[in-house]
């Protein structure tokens, strides 16, 4: 800056033009300055020259000068002071646009010295006769609060804003609500906020009335702001909940998708308080069409809609029960949309539409996109497990797919078949030869492990089971750990079922596994089996061949308590990620909000926030998702909190137990591939790393969990308590 | 916290222009640009990149954020959001902003943006508050505060007169009233036309999936009514339909009075000035069960979205061999009165496809002459007039284009392709897009349009047109 600008070059010419006596030349020069600024050239040296052009009747020129000021205010705060007088003068201009512009720009400049001059003009503009100025001023208060909260409080701006909620102009109301909400959020993120802090913006019933009136008259963005405020309101009784729902429902007919989604959120929240069954039914019915309409939007909007629909369906499976066809995938849909549609289709599957679904899924399995093909085949397995009556048809579709002999199709189908065998034991043994015929084509660990599990499970019915397993025993040390574990268990099963013919192979594998294997999990499991077999074959049978509970698809992919929380967040990032907000955005908010919730203290709320903390903490501990929060999220239990919560609150127990009361069942169903639409298998392996991959797999080893015989030498079966932690993380992942 | 701003990237992922970010670090917007570019680089198809990208916090910025982005032509619009914001809000805002840009600049491209930095900045300022709240987006109101770059302005600016006061209040007519004083946020006051006109375009789009037996698996028709109002004063319009029962899932422009619509299916509104979308709807093809005035049992409506006849038929015979395949596709129009126009059929031949040989021909049927029924006289001389094919080797998509398929005529495409060493794995679907002019699937008819105006008395010219398009996935 201090270096004198050279007397030539672009900037020099600009500076000459900026000082031209012709106004048009000056205006043109300003435009060129702006253009240079945009492409990244440094035109800060022209600051004084540009500033001279600030006093003008030409509004466009004024705006451009302001733009320049905003851009360089950060680097040259001392020069901005020179502009203060003009700002203050402009805030008194007869033209309301100029007044609004001055106020808006002063709010943006963020220069300490300007702020002190802002208060008086702002005071005036808040009472301006022109609504455009008033609504601009309202937002300016929020910005001022962000910079210097004490100025806002000392000048009584908060009181003024509260008065403005009753403004005659709906847009002013909407902006006021937006400003108050911003201040509320900023204030409640302070660690030491008292519940009576003036900056907080609790929605009272008198405010509610005003909001409901303004709602129907303002712009779409205003509606979103108002709807978000309505979502925070706590209704006094069911009458009031009904009233809110009835008033908000017409918003479903708005063209703007974000208004629709914000309205859905308000309804979902206040529907909790509605007792009239007929009204609830009506509301649910009205919710469907606008959601379906969103699906005709561009893919990115579709995706957001689909994520939200997915969430809503978990709470209200009946919303779209007849609409499955809407979710059929087109081959040029982006992958992220297709995957979401698949998930929803399976969710909507029932006996009446399963045929349409299956022929559709079969179609997808012949697609070009490998990822999508795999997911479609998985979906077939999920359908089989979900609808008993359709299982046989699903198996036929899978057999057809195996016939195609496309490598990844076959492998995925084998994995899915394993799940079907687990759900319907001893039902489809007839197809085992077909599966075994494809043994050579399998090269993915999961597919191999699945087939080995099937062979082990049905060893007594497969004549050449020892031959087949022999192939894997020969290559044992080259296989990946999951395959090794499966082979080990399958061979032991074989031995227990056909002791005469398989003495040799079991000896061989126990030897190899204990001596040549570098995975402690595999070695330990081999030792256990060895010891069991040598001391008490009966106990070994009880452990390895134990009955396992059948798997089932959990109705929800997120825990019930978390689901409630997320439903309150419909139409937000949280609902798109299916994770509570505090796990992915800034720090701090957790403290205040959950604190508030605790003082609100209906029990379910409390346990919800507890559960949330658990999920959040779990995620932090494992750092699964790259969603690494800033390290300090104060006052939250970390890591082991999971187990602690488990014993206290029923909601948290639910969180762990999913839908069933049997924790083991749930473990199996969650870890088993079919239950989980979301995570790619590689991921889940990572998660289990240390704890032994066996738990992802329905092996004899995990089966032993249920049996009292092996509670203690537990390598194959780590104590339940420990296992619950990764499960938490898994839940977060969904 | 809400929408943090807008960044516009060019084709190469470099920022062209961005709105002023309030964030204290300048790195903030760079982080987002980086995150998007990285994601795009990693993805095989740019369309497969998640539309909401998580952006981890850098050590300087506090807190993480997300970036919503959409592609528009060669450009990519980013909207970083921090805090728990509805991504749909970001997308809705981006869409609105892009529409505004189109209105101001005509085409939105890197070049037009560069030529109009000043306009774009002003639009940023007026549409998005730096605190993240969308502001004025009604183009009627915007035009008052940001002057479109028209020839008129250029002329005026040459003369160098001070015309601001007039411009700022709506081309002079409402100078006394001042901006934003209109009681209707979407309509400015004091509008005056010599010729009062209002036009409606009923535009419907069919989206369908047909399976290999020719059965329609799913089909949906989404329609919208676009209007262009050039009416003086504050006109009050009421529009009704002779067959409103075909309309379903209606989403209305905020100017429409909801209670009138819910009560007697009458669109009663004071229109914005200029172009706007009056309503969006879904066509329910089974009017008998759909609800009349009041909301009734919706489940019956849902199931009644029965399938609609597809305007054409495709027969595809594809033979796959070890290292290639041959195909024989015939497209026959099922319509006897309307011609299908601008037909584009895409077939994805799968990885490794190449060595395409194709032959396009016009099949029998339909004749060169036109049946009665009001369709235009079509030039169908020549065996394959205008039909052509092309192959995009990068996306391995074979595209077959036919400008016009006259009623009941048929066209065919034979050819073969090879896939080198690997087995062919084409997508088992043909995606066909087409237009039909002067036609709507729903046969929605405007019954009556009344324009009343308290102060002035004029008879506006009224016009209604229909137009359809479709996108059908035909599997084989």
Image (tube, rainbow, N blue to C red):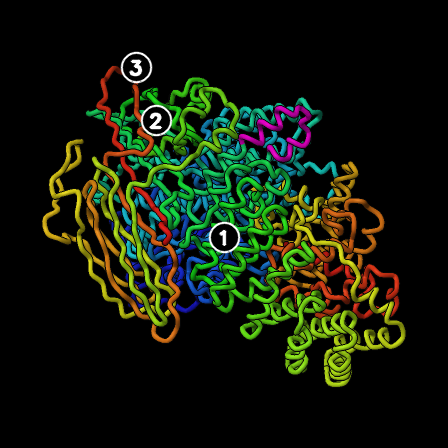
Decide which of A417, A116 is in the foreground and name it.
Answer: A417
Q: Which quadrant of the figure has residue B249?
A: top left
Residue under numbered circle 2? B271
Question: Is residue A300 covered in magenta?
Answer: no
**Chain name for mark 1:** A
Residue under numbered circle 3? B455
Residue under numbered circle 1? A361
Q: Give the range drawn in magenta.
A: A267-286
- Tell me the CA gap for discs 2 and 1: 46 Å
**Chain name for mark 3:** B
Q: Where is residue B45 in the image (x, y as percent from the top left)?
A: 42, 62
Q: Visible in this render: residue B223?
A: yes
Judging from the image, what secondary structure is the residue with disc 3 in? loop
Location of the C terminus of chain A by quadrant is bottom right
Decide which of B456, B144 is in the foreground and name it.
Answer: B456
Q: Position of residue B460 (x, y in %)?
A: 23, 21
Decide which of B49, A116 is in the foreground and name it.
Answer: B49
CB under 8 Å between discs 2 and 1 = no
């Amino acid at each position: 800056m201090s270096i004198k600008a050279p007397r030539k070059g672009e900037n020099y010419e600009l500076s000459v033009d900026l000082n031209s006596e012709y106004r048009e030349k000056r205006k043109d020069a300003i435009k060129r300055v702006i253009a240079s600024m945009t492409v990244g050239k440094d035109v800060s040296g022209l600051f004084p020259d540009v500033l001279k052009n600030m006093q003008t009747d030409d509004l466009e020129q004024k705006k451009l000068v302001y733009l320049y000021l905003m851009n360089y205010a950060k680097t040259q705060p001392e020069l901005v002071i020179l502009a203060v007088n003009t700002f203050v003068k402009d805030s008194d201009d007869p033209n309301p646009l100029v007044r609004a512009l001055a106020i808006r720009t002063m709010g943006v400049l963020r220069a300490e010295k300007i702020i002190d001059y802002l208060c008086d003009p702002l005071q005036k503009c808040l009472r301006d006769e022109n609504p455009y100025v008033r609504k601009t001023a309202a937002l300016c208060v929020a910005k001022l609060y962000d910079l210097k909260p004490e100025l806002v409080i000392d000048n009584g701006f908060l009181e003024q804003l509260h008065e403005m909620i009753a403004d005659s102009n709906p847009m002013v109301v909407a902006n006021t609500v937006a400003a108050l909400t911003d201040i509320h959020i900023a204030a409640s993120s302070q660690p030491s906020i008292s519940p009576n802090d003036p900056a907080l913006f609790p929605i009272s019933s008198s405010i509610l009335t005003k909001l409901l009136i303004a709602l129907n008259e303002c712009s779409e963005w205003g509606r979103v702001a108002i709807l978000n405020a309505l979502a925070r309101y706590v209704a006094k009784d069911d009458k009031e909940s009904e009233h809110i729902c009835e008033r908000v429902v017409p918003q479903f007919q708005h063209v703007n998708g974000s208004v629709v989604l914000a309205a859905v959120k308000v309804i979902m929240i206040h529907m909790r308080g509605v007792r009239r069954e007929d009204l609830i039914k009506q509301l649910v019915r009205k919710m469907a069409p606008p959601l379906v309409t969103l699906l005709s939007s561009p893919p990115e909007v579709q995706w957001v809609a689909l994520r939200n629909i997915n969430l809503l369906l978990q709470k209200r499976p009946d919303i779209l029960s007849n609409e499955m066809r809407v979710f059929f995938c087109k081959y040029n849909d982006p992958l992220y949309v297709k995957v979401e549609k698949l998930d929803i289709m399976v969710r909507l599957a029932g006996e009446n539409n399963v045929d349409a679904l299956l022929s559709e899924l079969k179609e997808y399995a012949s697609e070009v996109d490998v990822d999508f093909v795999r997911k479609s085949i998985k979906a077939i397995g999920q359908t089989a497990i979900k609808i008993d009556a359709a299982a046989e048809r699903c198996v036929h579709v899978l057999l057809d797919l195996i016939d195609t002999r496309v490598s990844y199709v076959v492998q995925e189908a084998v994995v899915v078949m394993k799940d079907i065998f687990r759900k319907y034991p001893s039902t489809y043994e007839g197809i085992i030869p077909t599966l075994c015929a494809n043994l050579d084509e399998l090269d993915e660990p999961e597919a191999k492990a699945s087939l080995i599990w099937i062979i082990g499970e049905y060893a007594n019915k497969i004549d050449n089971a020892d031959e087949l397993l022999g192939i894997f025993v020969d290559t044992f040390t080259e296989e990946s750990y999951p395959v090794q574990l499966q082979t080990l268990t399958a061979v032991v099963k074989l031995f227990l079922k056909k002791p005469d013919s398989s003495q040799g192979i079991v000896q061989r594998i126990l030897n190899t596994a204990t001596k040549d294997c570098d995975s402690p999990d595999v070695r330990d499991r081999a030792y256990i089996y060895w010891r069991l077999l040598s001391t008490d074959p009966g106990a070994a049978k009880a452990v390895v061949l134990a009955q396992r509970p059948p798997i089932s698809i959990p109705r929800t992919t997120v825990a019930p308590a978390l689901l409630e929380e997320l439903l309150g967040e419909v139409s937000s990032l949280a609902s798109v990620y299916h994770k509570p907000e505090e796990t992915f955005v800034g720090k701090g908010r957790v403290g205040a909000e959950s604190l508030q919730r605790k003082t609100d203290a209906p029990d379910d709320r409390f346990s919800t926030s507890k559960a949330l903390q658990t999920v959040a903490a779990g995620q932090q501990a494992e750092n699964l998702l790259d969603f690494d929060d800033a390290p300090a999220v104060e006052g939250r239990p970390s890591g082991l909190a999971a187990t602690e919560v488990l014993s206290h609150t029923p909601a948290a127990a639910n969180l762990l137990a999913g839908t069933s009361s049997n924790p083991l069942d749930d473990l199996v169903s969650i870890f088993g591939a079919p239950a989980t639409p979301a995570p790619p298998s590689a991921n889940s392996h990572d998660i289990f790393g240390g704890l032994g991959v066996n738990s992802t797999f329905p092996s004899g080893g995990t089966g032993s969990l249920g049996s009292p015989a092996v509670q203690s030498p537990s390598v194959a079966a780590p104590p339940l308590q420990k296992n619950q932690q990764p499960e938490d993380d898994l839940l977060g992942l969904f | 916290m809400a929408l943090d701003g807008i960044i516009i990237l060019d084709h190469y992922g470099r920022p062209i222009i961005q709105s002023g970010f309030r964030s204290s670090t300048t790195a903030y917007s760079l982080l987002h640009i980086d995150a998007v570019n990285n994601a795009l680089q990693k993805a095989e198809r740019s369309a497969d990149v998640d539309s909401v990208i998580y952006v981890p916090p850098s050590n300087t910025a506090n807190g993480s954020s997300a970036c919503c982005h959409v592609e528009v032509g060669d450009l990519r619009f980013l909207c970083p959001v921090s805090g728990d914001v509805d991504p749909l809000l970001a997308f809705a805002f981006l869409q609105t902003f892009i529409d505004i840009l189109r209105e101001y600049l005509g085409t939105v491209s890197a070049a037009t943006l560069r030529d109009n930095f000043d306009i774009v900045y002003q639009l940023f300022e007026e549409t998005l508050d730096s605190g993240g709240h969308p502001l004025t987006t009604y183009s009627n109101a915007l035009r008052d505060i940001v002057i479109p770059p028209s020839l008129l302005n250029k002329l005026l600016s040459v003369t160098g007169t001070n015309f601001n006061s007039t411009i700022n209040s709506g081309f002079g007519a409402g100078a006394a009233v001042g901006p934003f004083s209109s009681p209707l946020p979407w309509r400015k006051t004091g509008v005056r036309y010599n010729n009062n006109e209002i036009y409606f375009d009923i535009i419907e789009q069919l989206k369908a999936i047909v399976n290999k037996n020719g059965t329609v698996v799913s089909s949906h028709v989404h329609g919208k009514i676009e209007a262009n109002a050039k009416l003086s004063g504050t006109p009050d319009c009421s529009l009704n339909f002779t067959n409103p029962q075909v309309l379903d899932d209606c989403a209305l422009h905020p100017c429409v009075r909801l209670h009138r619509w819910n009560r007697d299916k009458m669109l009663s509104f004071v229109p914005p000035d200029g172009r706007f979308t009056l309503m969006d709807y879904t066509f329910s093809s089974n009017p008998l069960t759909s609800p009349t005035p009041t909301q009734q049992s919706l489940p019956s409506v849902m199931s009644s979205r029965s399938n609609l006849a597809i305007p054409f038929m495709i027969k595809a015979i594809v033979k796959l061999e070890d290292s290639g395949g041959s195909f024989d596709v015939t497209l026959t129009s099922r319509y006897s009165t309307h011609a299908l126009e601008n037909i584009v059929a895409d077939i994805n031949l799968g990885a490794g496809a190449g060595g395409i040989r194709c032959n396009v021909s016009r099949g029998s049927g339909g004749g060169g002459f036109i049946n009665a029924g009001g369709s235009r006289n079509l030039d169908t001389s020549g065996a394959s007039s205008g039909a052509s094919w092309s192959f995009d080797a990068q996306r391995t998509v074979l595209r077959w284009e036919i400008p016009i398929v006259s009623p009941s005529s048929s066209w065919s495409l034979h050819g073969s392709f090879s896939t080198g060493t690997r087995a062919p794995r084409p997508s088992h679907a043909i995606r066909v897009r087409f237009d039909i002019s002067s036609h709507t699937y729903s046969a929605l008819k405007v019954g009556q349009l009344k324009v009343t105006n308290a102060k002035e008395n004029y008879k506006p010219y009224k016009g209604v047109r229909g137009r359809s398009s479709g996108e059908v996935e035909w599997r084989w």
